[in-house]
Every structure is written in C-alpha cells, then in structure tokens.
Amino acid sequence: MQLKKATVLVIDDDPDVLTAVRLLLRPQVKEIVAEKNPANLPSLLRQYAFDVILLDMNFAASIHTGNEGIFWLKEIKRLKAQAAVIMITAYGDIDLAIRSLKEGAYDFVVKPWHNERLLTTLQEAVSGKQKSPKANGQSSSGSLTAPELLGESEAMQDIFYKIKKVAPTDANILILGENGTGKELIAKAIHQHSLRANQPFVKVDVGALTESLFESELFGHKKGAFTDAREERAGRFEAADKGTIFLDEIGNISLQQQAKLLSVLQNRQVIRVGSNEPINVNVRLLCATNVSLTDLASDARFRKDLIYRINTVEILVPPLRQRGNDVLLLARHYMALYAEKYFKGPLDLTARAIEKLKNYSFPGNVRELQYAMERAVIMADDQALDARDIIFSPIESVQPESILPTATNLEELERATIIKVLEKHNGVMTKAAKELGITRTALYRRLGKYEL
C-alpha cells in the first residue's frame, strides 16, 4: 500500500506534537486522526481500520517512565494483533523504546525527528515491509559497517538498535564500558550512520593530555603563545568542524580541564591559546570512558553539569564475558582475518579450543581475544587451532599479588614491573611508558622481548 492511501492514528498528549504531525501528514496520507487521550484507543480501533499508529511513550506530565506507552502498546496488540505501531520517544527513553520493539512495535522515532525519515518509516510500515537486520544497516551477523563490530547476542542487538536511532540525530552520546569492549568502534559506527558521515571524524585521547597540552590540542594556539608554539595551529575542535569529535577516556580529565571543555560546549566556540578571538565550531560530540556513570557522577571527580552536556544518550557496552556465543563469532572472525594476513590456509577450531574460549572470562574483552587469536594463528602448525594454541595475555590474567617483584634477577624484575604498570593503566601504552620513564617504542620492544 502507498502512504497516500493510508489512514494514520497519532496519540500524544502534547498539542504541539499533534499539530506538527497533522501538518506534515495531511498532504501525505488519506486520513489522519489525532488523539490526546490514550483511553479512547479501544473505541477508535473499533471505528477505524488504521494502517499505522503513532504512539507516544509518555502521557502523564509527572511520570516519565515510558510504562504508559508500553501499556497502551500491549492494549493495541491485544485488540488488533496485526497493527503496525510506531513509538514516539525522547532521547532518554531509548532503552524503553527498544523494549517496545520486543513487545511488538514496528519501530520507533526519536523527538525531534527528521520529517523525511518519519515519512520513510511510515511508508515501510503501511507497505508491510518486514524489517530485517540488513534493512537496519546490519549484516546477518549484526555488523554495523566496522567489521569488528559483530554480535548476535541480545545485548549487542540492543546496541545496534540504539546506533541506528541516535546516529541520524545530533545528540551527544556517552559510551560506557570496560577497556577493550569496542567503544571506539561504536563511536565510528555512529558517525558513519550520521548526517555528518562525509565530514571529519576526529578522535582525541583526552585522558593522555597533560594540563599544559589540553587547551592547545583541543582548541589550538597562536604563534608564540608558549615556548614551542612556532606556528599558528588549529585545535581538534576546529578540525572536526561540521563533523564529529570523539573524546576518549573523558573520565580521566581534571576538574580544571572539565571547566574549559564545558565552556566550549555551552558557547559552541573555541578560543586559541594566546588569542582573545572566539571561533565558532559546529561539532557532534561523542565521549567514552571506562568509569561507571555512578563513579563519574561525583562532585569531587566530575562536574554534573558537564555530565548532562555529554550524556544526552548513553550507550553501555557489555563486557565480552556477558555476550555468550559472540565469543566464538569474534574468534572465528579474527581467525579468518589473521589466516589471510599471515598466508595460512583455512583454519578451524577444535572442540577443546572452543571449550577453552567459552570458559575464559576475558578480562581484556574483545581486544584480548583479538590478540590471542592473532598469536594462535601465527603459531599454529595444523589446520585446526587447539586449546594449546590459544594463550591468553598475562597482562590480563595475572593477579596483582602474584606479580610483585620478589625475584632478584634483573630481567625478571623488569618483566614483573612492566606487567604491574600495564595492569595499573589498563593496557594504555602511553601512560605505562610515561610511568616507566621510557618511550612507547622502547616499551613495545620490551613487550616483544618478554613475549607479553
């Protein structure tokens, strides 16, 4: 069926929303019925044969749990099981909107929506087009552009839905998760599926920036602003203008750095070090941290006003140990990838190798699995990787009390110290090298030397 022949019901207690939808749809559909009170749903469903229903998630001004929308969705499906229902939700209700899909909703739209996208969603609903992973921008294995962003688990499917919904908006996104879970891949996927996809994507590891470099790196500097400022330089915010800036390890910046960042986000302007002239910037902000939101929301650690700025929508990335069979999906992906890279033939996993992968907790998450599979492929002598070929990193598996340098051999002391410092900094090479007093290159040489 074409949208022009459709009868549409929209239910929302906000008169402005009803007016906006009526104005948009009046020339596009056969008939549109607008209703403020969801209690009138049963009688409306008896009177009309609606082709699609737009249903708000919240109806009580003092209650914003989304449960009202779920309740009325269930009522609609009870009365008209085949009804195509599209939920209307705000940024903060994304999790509930995803739950609505499991309760039978066709799709959901996020306020404020883009009119063309809303019309496309309505057309798909009235034409009876079945949604599939590929239609949602995913491959059959759940990939979203980045090949490593794979997952068939329920937790990852929820994340794919979130990416699909938040990417086309300009909402600021906070990505939470342990080290090695793939937060940067998710940030890239959001950018690639956004309206800014053809503009720059600029990543900054803000946690590694010193107080003196923070302003210069992010906001730029004038020539002569400080000793090493030999030429004028644009900062990362200017480089990301009209595109996306991804601030990694946001939870590690100081309160003073937070104040400077907040000022830029509020004013949408940067001032280069050594200058008084503000420069307008138009960026979409994505942030990531391995610090939990509860720990982050501490006045002594992080400004709450900045949290609200960077956290219009949050995406919590699950650790690998909570993703079930995704472990084997990813293991086979990396096995095939490195078999091709190192000119090995097609490889398989023995039953013992599968058992070993399934029983390991992966404290280093996907990153640890990737390195383990690369090492296994390099060392493999047979066409099937066995349990003995898969060796997990001592950086992740060794407990702190067991790596105390009790030995007197100099090399053993150095190896134990490197492991301890790497664990302390969650494998971040820049920070570990700085504490050890050596360069990153020197640290990599020592990792090779001690087979870490």
Image (spheres, rainbow, N blue to C red):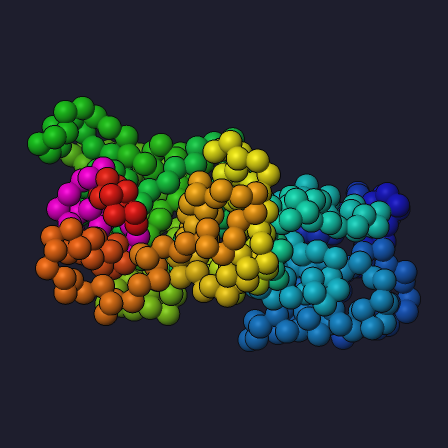
Q: Residue furthest top?
A: 231
Q: Provide residue 115's location: percent of width, then percent of height.
A: 66, 44
Instruction: Residue lying at the far front in this picture: please name it.
Output: 381
Q: What residue is at 17 percent from the left and 47 percent from the top?
A: 434
Q: Which residues are magenta?
A: 425-442
Magenta-drawn stretch contains 400 = no
Question: Residue at left 33%, top 65%?
Answer: 296
Is residue 432 one of those drawn in magenta? yes
The mark total stands at 0
Between residues 365 and 108, which one lies in front from this camera angle? Answer: 365
Residue 98 against residue 117 in the figure, above or below:
below
Relative to 58, is 278 above or below?
above
Q: Quadrant of residue 39?
A: bottom right
Q: Quadrant of the N terminus?
A: top right
Residue 140 screen position, x and y as percent: 68, 47
Q: Is residue 369 left or right of residue 95?
A: left
* Residue at left offset 34%, top offset 38%: 237
Residue 225: image location, x then y, percent: 13, 32
Please state the horizontal and vertical placement of residue 150, each as a whole percent of the image. Answer: 57, 49
Magenta-highlighted stretch: main secondary structure? Answer: helix
Q: Nearer the viewer, residue 64 or 133?
A: 133
Instruction: Give the residue drawn at x 44%, y 32%.
Output: 200
* 51 shown above or below 99: above
Q: Tell me if residue 325 comes above or below residue 23 in the rendering.
A: below
Q: Quadrant of residue 425?
A: bottom left
Q: Is residue 354 visible?
A: yes
| Residue 15 showing in the rendered view | no
Judge left or right: residue 408 versus residue 247: left
